[in-house]
Image (tube, coloured by chain):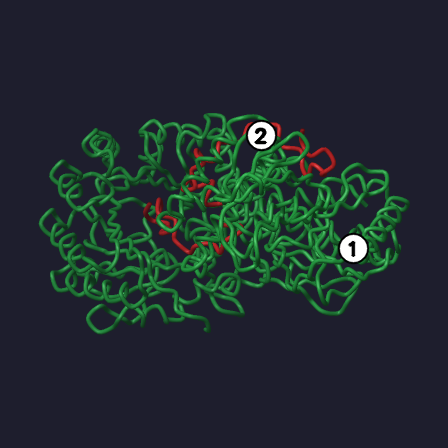
Chain colours: A green, B red
Amino acid sequence: MTGPLVPFREIVLKVHSRCDLACDHCYVYEHADQSWRTRPKAISDDVIFRTAQRLAEHAKTHALPSVSVILHGGEPLLAGPARLRRVCEELTSAFEGVAELDLRIHTNGLQLSPRYLDLFDEFGVRVGISLDGDRAANDRHRRYADGRSSHPLVLKAVELLRQERYRHLYLGLLCTVDIENDPRAVLDALAELDPPLIDFLLPHATWDDPPPRPGGSPTAYADWLLTVFDHWQERGRPVPVRLFSSVLSTLGGGPSLTESLGLAPTDLVVVETDGQLEQVDSLKSAYEGAAATGFDVFTHAFDEVAAHPGVRARQLGLAGVSETCRQCPVVRSCGGGLYTHRYRSTGPSDAFDNPSVYCADLAALVRGIEARTATALAAPAVTGPVELVAAQQDLTRTLLALLNADIGQRGGEQWEAAWELAAGIEASEEGARGLNEVLAHPYTRTWLLDAMEPVRERSGAVDVVHRMSACLASAVVRAGLDLFVRVPFSGGRIFLPGLGELRMADEGESGAALLIATEDGFLVRREGGDAAERRIVRPDAAGPGWRPLRRIPTPGSAAGFVLDDLDPYRDCFSLPAAGALDERAAAGLAARIGEAWTLIGTKAPGRTEEMAGRLTTLTPLTGLPPAEPAVGRHGYGALGIAPDASSEQLASALLRGFRRAELQALRDVTDLYAADGSWEHRMPWQEETVPFSRLLTDTYERMALGVFDRRYLEGVPQALDALEGAAELTIDGKQLLHRMRKEI
Amino acid sequence: MKISESPRPFAVAKKESVPLSKIDTRTAEATRKLGRVFAASTDRHSMASTFSSAL
């Protein structure tokens, strides 16, 4: 099995191997593996010590920021307070200066008392409790050996945890599902105890030993959980539910949150009371010895266990699930379910190379949650162009706020002054609008992304302040604000984003300029210079020391383009930006762009309407094939073009570029797909297989180019089918596909 | 007088933006937004463990 070792981040430490309850659904005592009988009752000092050492060594080797240790068993409280104190002390001291230690305990709660809780408080051990619902539900399985109910004592334990002094240790409640229990009553009973978190566990089962299905329904467990889900939603989601959180996360393209679901690598290992190292112990439901590795803390480092094939098998993501699962559209959310539940002792291949015995339930659960939440979860930006622009705006503003938070010392007084000025500008309506216009400029995003790159930290603080001041000046000019802006410069020039380039002094010179808006433009003078040096600039007209960005009109539409061949931050494409165009070249290009626009408008008036005001900035690049557009590392609205392209070529570039830019803009603010590259997709129009993202982009662009040549549309319906059935797709992605379907 | 001929790139969003100085970049939502344009951090979810038999 290839790939780097996945270090363990969660260690399940069995501090006691026996239990004071006799729950009949327990995987430790009631299922195939009976190794508990041979284990020492309690963890020994030696094992405690060696485990702590080995764990700290593991954390150091992999520079782990934190490790979770979950005290478990059997019933961990049976180890007694003295032994538990020993465990906490050894672990805490071993981890001192190495990594953060996150201690937890999972218990049936029967022995929980202030004595234990005070100890846990001392070491920050958080407490999770098993509870299957109300008394009736809990009594179904969770009884003493003599048949007595455990419920009253568990409630007592939870009450203790809910006290003010111990509240911060209350981790939550873990409930094993029994479909004979009323799902709403179970949720209510758990929620009533005010836990910070709950989770539902499917009863351990395998293909050899399937779960009970009293009604015979293949989705009985999903139906039960979805009833909980609906009740949970109705009640306003009173408590986070790990199972639901995981599905909601993966539906949105994020990671799974439990080993029961999804493709996230399992970074768990179990240490038994005698120091033996085991794979995750739910495997005990499969067969005797299923969890064994042959390693122990005395003889082996954790890395050796990490390399064990059984352990690796649960870290391989897609490669670790059955072929059936790999082809299934819900696999990112389901992940083939809990590893143990795939076990089948007979059959042609490896015993775990199967879907889960709960497969139908898991699929129904994922689809059910998706159906119930898709509308609420889908980002408005996917279907609303105004919302997309707003989301882009919001991202830029968040980046600027992050820059302010990051710049700290480097920015000095100059940055602070600029930041204060920004607040002042924002305070008025016109100012806010002017500033937002500058922030919406595509190369503002480029500046922000660049400014936060680590390499720039050393040298670029000065540039960052200069650009910020220039942005503010530009905002003030656009808004017509009666406010002086001081703009420091170097290289003798100031570039006002979206407006043009101001020559302040000779090339080698640095200084500062003072700008203020006027009736029909702005006034600028050099700081420290004499009054006679003031000049008024009309932004749209070239003048001494002022080189405006050129506007390119688009026939039939007011918006037009800005030809930006001056902004220093325009150099954000994979090909270099061309130098500033001379009058002749610029005029020629403008004319051809106008013709291209007319061409598009003739074939597809809807498109020019769409593009107007959304594509705003064109930057000539060198080496770009003439009919090709370029999208780079900038905000929504810019395109790189070839300055010598013909009108027809430009028409193609603009149309294709608009689509490409829109998808990029969506990727910036939504999650259209996840695990891109995990599957290969055939493109209907060429031999090679490609990742999902490429199939999506190509299809999206072809749909637009179809107005020039119908042949572009061949294969698009098949492509849409393939995209729709793909596991990479998220809720946002499905919305986009829905929109694409409506387009053709 | 404002620059009448310069194209207004985008209609400013109708809803009020949070003022720059009040934007909190450490919330889960902000982290998610920023994570789309920066490389996502590989830190684990701190609230719950992934072990199915514990929280």
Whether A517 is drawn above or below A633: the answer is above
* Three-letter amino acid code at the position of disc 2: Leu
Residue A209 in view of the camera: no
Quadrant assignment, res A305: bottom left
Image quarter where the N terminus of chain A lies is: bottom left
Would you name the residue on which mark 2 appears? A481
Q: Position of residue A664 (x, y in %)?
A: 64, 51
Residue at image position (45%, 46%) is: A403
Q: What is the secondary structure assignment of the residue under circle 2? A: loop
The chain ID associated with circle 1 is A
Between A602 and A671, the one lying in front of the other is A602
Quadrant assignment, res A588: bottom right
The chain ID associated with circle 2 is A
Q: What is the secondary structure assignment of the residue under circle 1? A: helix
Q: Position of residue A247 (x, y in %)?
A: 50, 45
Q: Position of residue B46 (x, y in %)?
A: 35, 47
Residue at image position (47%, 57%) is: A453
Would you name the residue on which mark 1 appears? A583
- Decide if residue A414 is on the left or right side of residue B38: left
Image quarter where the C terminus of chain A lies is: top right
Residue at image position (44%, 29%) is: A184
Between A166 and A564, the one lying in front of the other is A564
**Are marks 2 and 1 in one subunit?**
yes
Quadrant assignment, res A619: bottom right
